[in-house]
Image: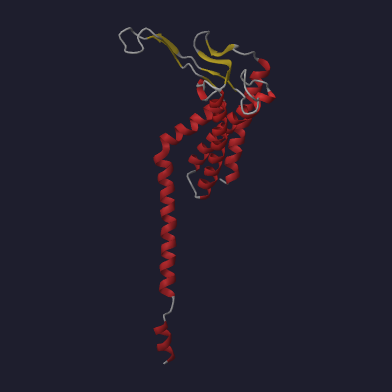
Amino acid sequence: MKIYKYFLIALAIICIDQASKLLVHEYMYLHEEFTVIGNEQYGFKLHYLLNPGMAFGLKWNNEFGKLALTIFRIFAMVGIAYYLIRMAKQGAHRGFLICMSLILGGAIGNVIDSTFYGVLLNNAPMGSSTPWFHGQVIDMLFFPLFDFVWPQWVPFFGGQYFLFFSPVFNIADSSIFIGVLIILVMQKRFFKEHEEGTETVELVVEQQTEVTIQTQPTETDNSEKTA
C-alpha cells in the first residue's frame, strides 16, 4: 500500500468526524439527548456536549491550559504525520500504518475543533481572550451500560454512584482509542515483522559487500599475470 493511501484513511476519518459534529451542531441543541439503541436508561445515545478540554470529557480548568492543549495537539498532529511517512518508507507492517492513520485522522479532527470552531461556530468558552485556538470540541457518543452504588465498606468510593460508561466522546476520540488499542494488542506482531524485514535487508547488503570484495583483483595477482 502506497503512502498516500494511509493519508486517505486519515482523511476519511476526518470527514466522518467533522460531518457528525456539524450535523449534531445543526440539528440538536446543547445537552439534548435521544436514544439510538436501548432504552431511556441504558444503550447507545446521542448527547450533545461541548468539551473545552481533552478526550472523553476530561477538562482543563483555565484558559492557559486550553491554549496549551490546542498547541500540543497541533505539534502532535505534525509529529504523527512525519512518523507515519517515516515508518511507511521503512516498510513497517501494514496494520501498524493503518492504526497510525486512524490516530492521525482523529488528532486532526480534534485540532480542527480546537482551532476553528471558536470562530466558525462561535462556541469558545465565555471569557476567552480570542475565539481562535479556543474552540470547544463537539462530543455526542454516549454509551451508558450499567450503574450501581458502591457498598459503604469500599474504601474511598463507599456510597457513591457509579455509571459505566459515563464519558461522552466523538468519532475522532474513538479513532485514536482504537488505533492505540490495536497497536498495544498487536505490537509483537507489528514490530517483529518490521525487525525481521530490517534484518533481511541488512543481510542482503552484507552478502553483496562480501561478493564485491571477493571478486576484486589484487595488485599481486596483476603483477603475476604481467610476469
Q: Name the residue at 53% across, 36% down.
A: 76
Which is nearer the eye, 181 or 64?
Answer: 64
The picture quadrant where one finds residue 211 is bottom left
| Horizontal and vertical percent position of residue 205 | 44, 62
| Horizontal and vertical percent position of residue 64 | 55, 26
| Horizontal and vertical percent position of residue 133 | 62, 28
Residue 28, placed above or below residue 218: above
Residue 224, placed above or below residue 172: below
Residue 104, placed above or below residue 66: below
> In the rendered view, does 93 fall on the left or right side of 160?
right
Which quadrant, please, contains the C terminus? bottom left
> In the rendered view, does 222 fall on the left or right side of 23?
left
Which quadrant, please, contains the N terminus? top right
The picture quadrant where one finds residue 74 is top right
| Horizontal and vertical percent position of residue 20 | 62, 23
> In the rendered view, does 11 fall on the left or right side of 39?
right
- Count of marks, rendered view: 0
